[in-house]
Structure formats: C-alpha cells, structure tokens
Image: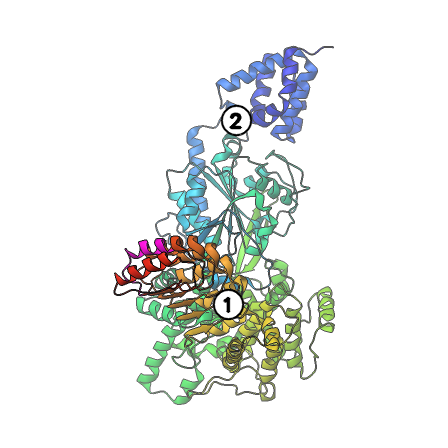
Amino acid sequence: MALGPCCTDLMKRRVELVEGWSRHVAFLLDLLYKLGALTEEDVDSVRGGGCRGERERMRRLLDVLHGRGEEACRAFQHALQQVSADPQPPPSDSNSCGQSLTFPELQGAMRKHKEILALEHSPMDYLSIRGRAAADGSNCTFIETTLLQSVGFLVPPRYQHEATDAGDAFRTVEVPPGTQGPTCGFSTLCQSLLFGRDDGVIFLCGVAGSGKTTLVRQLVHEWVVSEETQKVIISLSFRELNLVSEPQSLQDLLCVHYSHLRPVLAHILASDPSKILLILDGLDEFRIPLDFDRTPKCSDPELAQSMGSMVVNLIKGNLLPGRSLLLTSRPYAVTKVPLQLVSVFFTVLGFSPEQQHQYFLRTCQTAEAADVIQHYVSSHKPLLRMCHIPAFCWIVATALQNFSNAQESLQQKLDDKQESVALKTRVVVVPQGPGKPTTITEIYCCFLKAIIVFHTEGREANLGVNRLQEAPQVMQGMRSLLRDLGGLAFRGLLERRFLFDNSDLGSLALGHCELSRAFLVETLREDRTSLVCEKSFHFIHTSLQEFLAALYYVQQSLSGRDPFSGHKPGLLEVMRKALEAGRYRLIGPSYHRHIKKVFCWSESHQSGHLDLFCRFLSGLLVPSTRQILEGLFPQEPQKLLSVPACRAAGPVPPASAPPFFLKLLRSQLQHRELRPERQVNACHCLYEALDPGLPQRLERWLRLLAQQGEPALERQRQQQDWSELAFLLELSPALQDLNLEAQDLRADGLRRLLPVLHLFHTLRLAQNPLGPEGAAVLCLAVRNPDCRIEKLWLVATDLGCNGVEILSDALKENRTVVDLRMAINSIGDKGAGHLAELLRHNHTLRDIRLRDNHVTDKGAELLMAALKDNNTLEFLWLFDNKFSKDGVRKLKEFAKSRSTLDIKVCV
C-alpha cells in the first residue's frame, strides 16, 4: 500500500524529530490521545511502563503512528504545530508527579539549591576540624592563585614526581609551541564558565594541592552571590561517582545527589542545556576506565548506564548537548580524555611569591610573623620551590607558626623562673640558628608535631608552654596510632591508591579516632532509596600520605620489623623479582637491608611517584630530624646510627644520615642506567639527608665544565644531567658567573637549567647549538622579575634571525642586561632590524657586539636610525660584516656625531 504524504514526511524527518522533539513526547502523547489518533493501548505501549527514556519513547511513537496510517500522522503534524505555538507546554514544566510547575516553585528550588551548594563549597582549611562554613557568603575569603590559559596541553612522560616541577611552573610550562597563553587569575576562569557561551569542555589541571578544588569552591561561591549569570551549576566529584556500582540514569543520579531538585530536575535538564554548568572534580581519582572509542552513544538522560559510559557521554556532549563542562585533574590523568574534545586548558600554577606572602599574612596572627616566615622560606630554595603549592604553604605556616608562638612562651617562662639547662635541652622547639628546619622533612616533622600537640583532642585553644613540654609523652602515646595510619599510607602508596574505605580503617583499628579525623578527609554518599550511607577517605594532601608512609617505614625498620610484611602477596612477588634484578646486595643488619630494599624498589619505578617518599625517608634517617618527633621512635642502638642521637648544642653542623645510606645514594648518582630525573631525586635525597658532600659534588661539576674538548670528559658530561647541576647551583647563591661555553648545551638542557639562569650576573653560553628554541628559554629568564643577568654572552649559538627576534622582544622589558654579545649568529639585516627595534625601547643596554653576522649596509642604516633615539648605548662592535666602503664611512661619521658611542667597524 502506498504511503500518504504525511507518513512519508515523518519518515524523512525521523532523525530530526527524535533529536529535537523528544522532550515534548509526554505532551504529544496526551494530545494525540485526546484527538483520538492513539488508543489507550498505544499510549501504554509508547510509555513502556515508564522504563523508557524520552528519545526511546519518541522512536516508539513514530513506529506506532506509521502503523496507524495517514490520519494519525496528520494528527501528529497538527500536534507539532501546537508545540511550536507554545514552546513550553505544560508537561515539560511539570514535576515528577505530573503536577504543573509554577515559576515561584522553580525559583524556590533554585534558591535552596544555591544555599546547599554554598554550604558544600564553603571555604575550608585543609584541616577538617578547623573548617569554617560561610553559607551566607559574608565571610568567604579566597587567596588568588595564578593560572595559565592555553588551547593545547602537552603531557610529557612522567619520569619525576609532580611536586618536583612545582617551583619551575612560573618560568616554564610544557605546552605545544604557539599555544601558550598569558597567565591569568580566577576572574578569567569565572568569566569563561559563568558568563560565556562556551559549550565545550574546559580542563582545569594542576598538581596535588595546587588549588583546583578551592577554585571550584570559589566558582560556586561566585555563582551563589551573582545575580547576573543565568547558569545552573551541578557539581559532582569523581570520588562520589566511584561509589556508584550499579547502572543509573543521569537524571536518577542527580535526583539522589540533589534530592531537593527532584521536583524541577526534569525541567532543568530539558529546558535549555546551555544554561547548565556541570562540574566534574578530580578525574585523576576516578577508578573506572574510560573508553571513548567503544562506549555506546547515549543522549537520553533518563536511560540507565554505567558510570564509565555516563562520564564518556557527558564529556563527548551526547548527554546534555550544549552544556558547559568543567573537568579538574592532576597532570598525569589528563591523557584519559582525548585532547580534541577539550576546548580550553587552564593550568593551575599555584602561588606566586606575592600570593605566598598574602597567604602568610592571612594565616599568621601578626604581619611580623608572616614576614619572618616569608623571608625564611625565600632564603631556602627547596622550600621556596615547594611553596608555590598552596597546600605546602599551609603546612609551612602551621609548622613554623605554632612552634614559634609556643617557643616564645616557653622561653619567657624559662627566663622568668630561671629553669635548669637540662629542661631547656630536653624540649624540642624550632630555634633560631643551626637547629631551625631547613629541609622539607624537618618542616613536615614540625607540622606533624604541631597537629598532634596543638590541634587534636580539643587542644587548639591551648598553644602554651605545657603542651610543648608534654610533647614527648603525647607523641609516645600516639605511636601505635601513627604506625597504623602510616601503614595505611604506605599500602596505598605501593598500590598507587589514594582512596580508602571503612574496611581499610577498621582493619587497622583507626576507626573514628581523633588522629584519623585530623589527617583524613571523609567523603559521604547517602543512598536515600536503600537508606545506605557509604564512606570513603583520603589524606588531606598526597604529600602527607607520602610522609606518613616514610615515617612508618623508618619506625618499622628501626624496630627490626619488615615494613613490607602484611601486604598483598602479589605485590611482594613483583617486588622480589625487582630486587633479584637490582644492583644492591641486601646484606648487613636488617635495618640496612630494609632501607636498601625500598630504594631498589623505587629505582624499578621510573615514573617517579615514589620520589617524595624517598626524600622523606632520607630525611628521617637523620637523627636530629627524628629528634623533632621525640617520643615517637623506639630507643635506637648507637651501632645502627653511627652518629650522635642528639643535635649538638654549639654551632656544630648537624649530623647527617648514617654513612651506609649516604654511600647508597652516591652510588645511585654513578649508575649509568638510572634516568636523569632519578639522579636529580638522588640529589634531593642527599640534601634531605644533610650530606656534607654536596658542595664537593658541585665543585666536580664546575671542574668538568671548565675543561673543554677532551673526549673522555665529553663522554662523562653526556652522562650528567643538567637538572642536577641546576639543583646544586640553587644551593650555592654566592656563585655569580656561570660559564657553560662549548658544552654542547641544547634548548632542552637549557630549559632544565631555567630555575637558576636568572640568578647569575654573567651568563656565558657561547658555542652551544641553542637555536631559536634556546632563545625562547632565555626569554623566560630575562623576563623573570628577579632577573640579575647583566652580561649575556651568546656567541655562535645558532640564533639566526628568528632567535634574535624572540630574544629582542623579551629584552624590551628587561632592565638588568647591559652587555649583549651575539657574534657569529647569522642574523643578517632582518635580525639587525629586530635589534634596532629593541634599541628604541631598551635604555639599559650599554654594549652590543655583532661581529660576523652577515649584516649589510641596509642593516647598518636601521641600527643608526634607532640609535638617534637611544643615548645609552656606549659600544657597538660590527667587525667582519658585509659592509661596503660607503657603509663603513657612514657608520664612522655617525660615531663622530656621538661622543658617547664607540662603533667598531671595518670593510
């Protein structure tokens, strides 16, 4: 039988009708039933007992209409016209009970939604027992962090711990060339998400503790107080999604999470998805794999699917097309999402030095205390690098401020009562002088002690003398609990697991003790349908988990117990094979064997996720560092330590880690198969272990650099890593002249040295193949606000015209470089033009040398024209260029007209 025109039209428009009209299917069904085009059985068949989503019901309705014939299809077209005339028919504005939804009801639901999100995302201290809610928004305070916006993001292979690069983030960011944008603040992110029309995926990436979740809290707060934005924020964390084991529809998931939105949720999802801002926080914590190639497409928010499939469809835009989506993650998990699906990347760089000071001012009780902490951190480069991470700033402030306050009170009491010297030496404080913490491990020890002594069991109000005097007894009482907590941290580190459940805590007798509440954050998910409450836990910061794991390992080793005992058999088997293939012979006392074992284990993992753990372990092997936690460790036999147990009272340098351990780390530095990043971490470990030989290692580096051209030395140099040199140079602020001439140094090596390049007065880089890429690295150094470079020597570095252009743009803003030597770089007339433009803006340069650069008379004319506006340049050397006799004459005549300018030139 031939099809009528209406049936034919519906068949042609089937895809359009399913995509664009499914949200009106309930209204269409009711209208067609009233018109007599459908029977009651037809309506029940389309609805499918309520188990079908809107799109599936629309497909079923079209099939039924096709079977009913031309008249039914004509009635359907008539119903479509009514929907067009009334774009918001009653069914789409009804709640889950089918009752009409009024505008005041929608307003009331949204008002309550804002109140609940304001409570959930109020500003919080990392320490949960000190959190402060600000539901009304009146006391919301957020410290500004620095972001970098880009349209692409390159994720290099992870060979080192993410905290290692934190301090370098303000000087170099690994993004594809040409895609790096300017640094920005929260306002740029807020404008893009709350007030823009971007319907793509915005990725917010940063290391642990850099402030990603805080930015989400700040974004929600801005949305709560703003009356201009039309967005509706729906926020979910991947920690909570991990707890959903059964397939669920997006609508049901949101109804469970936001039960107060149940009456209006269908309306919000169906009305205008472009007004929805969906936040998915913590992609790196999502345990379910994401398959973007084979996951079935699902565009129906009422259709049940697994959590992995739902996340894929949300990111791809199949679910809620047109919505804005904010994803947050640590760097290593960025590759879980295909980069072509992401429209904008924001990298959280953390705190700049000014923002660090602002944070200390906000945290400390007085401005003087904040200035002291800031000055102290600035004078210790390893601490300064870590303080770009906001979480570490909090740890430093907590560690130093509490003990400084208590120390002042204690000193006053001792002076007033003239206590005995024995009492003074027994109390562990943070003194001025040799005993003040200089390593990251000492900072974390002070932090741990501050939390236990001053901030648990209601002690926060008591920061006085008695608590500090009782510290050894308090620490001894916490020994078993800390061992259990450290065992949990160590197991999670081995399994690369950062989320734990009740069974993990119960097996270690941690439960809800005060100590676990101080260091663990609880994530709660309530299932109101089954009346079940599921909990998960994570440490307040991943670096604290790594520190507690190291603390546990040293506790067990000093007690003669194997720290690996009690863990998964499969894990121990993998470790046994790694040890058999390792370089170390695990002989000697058990204490030595345990330490060697874990370093062999870390070497077998080239990803670097154990780097910070090894640094903490190195620091905790120093007796004076352990003395900060007096009472926590068992009595240690002198034969295990080989060093005094207590720090000397006089100005004697503190004892280092045991000799066997220093020998172990030094052997790592000589290991040819070890990646350069592991060698750098060995240097960090030596620093934490207070190795007195680090200055000698720098001297060997400088001797190696001073001798050029010898084949044996060249082979040795190739085995070195420039990052190691950068680390050692940071520890030697007195060095003013860095001579790297003729070292085969390339742009990648120069980038590794970037953290220290700006610190030297003279930078000699001649006869190295740097090229334009190297010039781009130098730009970051000369633009650094703390740049001290006065002499920049770049003879024969293959800069070319492009390299000179890049460097000239950066030098326009520089006010320190006075001597620029760029001979033998083939810059030509075009490069001379870039330098001429530089001279119009820069009035700091005094000496420029451009010998043998293929500059002709045209380039000379450009330079002379620029020098008419520049009265500060004193020397311009142009030997061995391609000038004509007439060009040389003009240059000499120009020089005579300027008594303060010496131009050297020849034919």
| Mark 2 to mark 1 CA distance (whole Å) | 73 Å
Is residue 482 visible from the viewing direction of this image? Answer: no
Residue 472 position (above or below residue 830) = below
Q: Nearer the viewer, mark 2 or mark 1?
A: 1
Residue, x 68% and y 14% (percent of image)? 68
Residue 623 position (above or below residue 221) = below
Identify the amino acid type marked 1: Gln
User: First in sequence: mark 2 or mark 1?
Assistant: 2
Q: Which residue is mark 1?
A: 767
Q: Which residue is mark 2?
A: 92
Residue 144 position (above or below residue 93) = below
Residue, x 37% and y 70% (percent of image)? 373
Q: How far across and how far down the image is residue 32, in percent?
A: 60, 16
Q: How far across and how far down the image is residue 750, in percent?
A: 51, 64
Residue, x 74% and y 69% (percent of image)? 577
Identify the amino acid type marked 2: Ser
Q: How far across and how far down the image is residue 153, in percent?
A: 54, 51
Circle 2 residues within 10 Å: few <14, some 14–19, many ≥20: many
